[in-house]
Image (cartoon, rainbow, N blue to C red):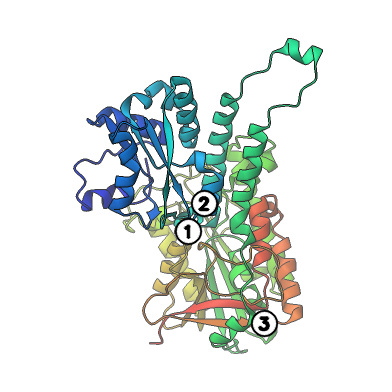
């Protein structure tokens, strides 16, 4: 059930056997399945995202169990401060098969290690710690991006807390009557430590001001320009290019914003709006209508006229799926798993009832491009992690004609940094990201009034601000500069 390339890379590296589960059943169930298939008496558990791991490390970890000195050996990474604090949660273990009982592992999820330790204590197993130097973990936000990484950390924290609570014996009610005692502290301490771990990516250091001087300044638009911004979701246009679009309109350029989806797959917004934990398709559609209205207000805040926005109403989190349909006229329409729609059923969209097919999507983008005849296209960067954003880039490039393209980034690990309002700081490229060959970064300076308008435009998206992460993300894009990735000149 994993969506990364671990299975393929293991097979390519020569693994004798790779077990692939079609459905993600959680870490505990995956380990239980592997234990059933394994033939050895001593088993080795390792995370697939370790850095610096060498054969000597594995020999050192296995030695106590193979030599009969312990029933389970747990690795401790000496250079990883968080790993030292939470050493009991280490997933690197050598242990005897009898400790991996299915009834112990089932349903533990990311709380597998806590459950293993609890069972080892009950079974009287001998457990030793083995120090490892030069080995670290790859952080989830580096693998999956900030938002998905935080979601996975929250999920792991929930599993850990559930297992920790099982480890604390329930107090005898009669003892509470005769003597007041403090509640068990282990779950509380675990929550505090996990909260600190979750806060780590949000507390990143501020970039130096001097770093902005390394990038050329983007030339502003002129009164003769016709700008077409092609974005995947409402608010993307303000996040990535709100200041640039405001300045372009201020000098007389024609600005059109084509919004491909209405962002109608935001589960948090739908839950808050519908006042239910499990939102219904109707709740998701209500969010889409709300975000459509928010886009108009945001663009008006930037000074753009009411007719500057064009909406297609295609499905959020499925735009790439629609675009990859091949464009065949008879391709079936994609149905959104959130709104239950398979066509554009929102009011004031460019083509009401347009089916969610590649052919319809391509035709509508081409129609807007013909009407605008852009001299400049603004859209998402191809290195963005969101599939909808990459689909928007491909559509914009396909229908730009001879117009040059400038692109911006929204979802990339470690970006923006810091993840909070920093209007006096420049927006710098994501750390560790490499542009395609021939591409360059450029910055567009924003004056105080433009920054004020951009911040006000982002506040118009109240449906997004109910999420603490998105509230920080939106504020984090109000900087002294906007950042663009430019393809090589043709």
Residue to which mark 2 is pinned: 149
Disc 1 and disc 3: Cα gap in Å? 34 Å
Q: Nearer the viewer, residue 420 or 179?
A: 179
Lower position in the chain sequence, tag 1 or tag 3: 1
Q: Residues within 10 Å of mark 3 (few under 14, many from 20)?
A: some
Residue plotted at (62% across, 44% down)? 193
Image quarter of residue 428: bottom right
**SS label for mark 3:** helix
Residues marked 2 and 1 touching at CB (< 8 Å): yes
Give the farthest residue toward the top. 174
| CA neighbours of label 1 inside 10 A, class few (<14), some (14 to 19), many (20+) | some
Q: Secondary structure at mark 2?
A: helix
Residue where numbered disc 3 is placed: 247
The x and y percentages for residue 455 are 72, 68
Tell which of 489 and 22 is nearer to you. Answer: 22
Q: Mark 2 to mark 3: distance in Å?
A: 35 Å
């Amino acid at each position: 059930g994993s969506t990364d390339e671990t299975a393929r890379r293991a097979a390519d590296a020569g693994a004798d056997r790779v077990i692939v589960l079609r459905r993600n059943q959680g870490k505990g169930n995956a380990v239980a399945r592997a234990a059933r298939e394994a033939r050895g008496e001593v088993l080795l558990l390792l995370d697939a995202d370790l850095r610096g791991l060498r054969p000597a490390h594995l020999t050192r970890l296995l030695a106590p169990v193979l030599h009969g000195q312990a029933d389970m050996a747990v690795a401790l990474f000496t250079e990883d401060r968080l790993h030292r604090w939470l050493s009991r949660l280490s997933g690197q273990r050598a242990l005897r098969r009898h400790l991996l009982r299915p009834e112990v592992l089932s349903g533990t999820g990311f709380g597998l290690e806590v459950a293993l330790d609890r069972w080892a204590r009950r079974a009287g197993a001998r457990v030793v710690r083995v120090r490892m130097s030069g080995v670290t973990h790859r952080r989830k936000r580096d693998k999956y991006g900030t938002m998905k990484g935080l979601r996975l950390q929250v999920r792991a924290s929930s599993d850990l807390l559930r297992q920790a609570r099982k480890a604390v014996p329930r107090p005898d009610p009669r003892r509470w009557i005769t003597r007041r005692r403090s509640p068990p502290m282990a779950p509380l301490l675990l929550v505090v430590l996990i909260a600190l771990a979750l806060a780590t990516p949000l507390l990143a250091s501020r970039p130096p001001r001097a770093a902005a001087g390394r990038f050329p300044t983007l030339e502003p638009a002129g009164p003769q320009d016709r700008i077409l911004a092609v974005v995947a979701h409402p608010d993307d246009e303000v996040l990535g290019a709100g200041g640039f679009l405001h300045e372009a309109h201020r000098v007389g350029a024609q600005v059109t914003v084509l919004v491909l989806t209405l962002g109608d797959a935001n589960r948090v917004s739908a839950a808050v709006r519908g006042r239910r934990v499990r939102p219904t398709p109707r709740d998701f559609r209500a969010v889409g209508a709300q975000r459509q209205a928010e886009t108009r207000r945001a663009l008006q805040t930037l000074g753009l006229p009411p007719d500057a926005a064009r909406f297609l109403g295609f499905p959020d989190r499925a735009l790439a799926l629609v675009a990859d349909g091949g464009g065949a006229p008879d391709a079936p329409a994609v149905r959104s798993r959130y709104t239950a729609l398979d066509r554009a059923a929102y009011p004031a969209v460019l083509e009401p009832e347009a089916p969610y097919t590649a052919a319809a999507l391509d035709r509508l983008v081409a129609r807007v491009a013909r009407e605008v005849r852009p001299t400049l296209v603004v859209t998402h960067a191809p290195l963005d992690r969101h599939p909808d954003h990459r689909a928007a880039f491909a559509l914009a490039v396909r229908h730009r004609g001879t117009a040059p393209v400038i692109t911006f980034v929204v979802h990339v690990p470690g970006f923006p940094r810091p993840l909070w309002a920093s209007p006096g700081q420049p927006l710098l490229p994501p750390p560790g990201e490499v542009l395609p060959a021939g591409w360059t970064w450029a910055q567009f300076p924003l004056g105080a009034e433009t920054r004020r308008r951009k911040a006000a435009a982002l506040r118009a998206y109240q449906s997004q601000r109910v999420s603490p992460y998105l509230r920080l993300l939106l504020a984090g894009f109000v900087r002294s500069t906007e950042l663009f990735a430019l393809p090589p000149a043709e």
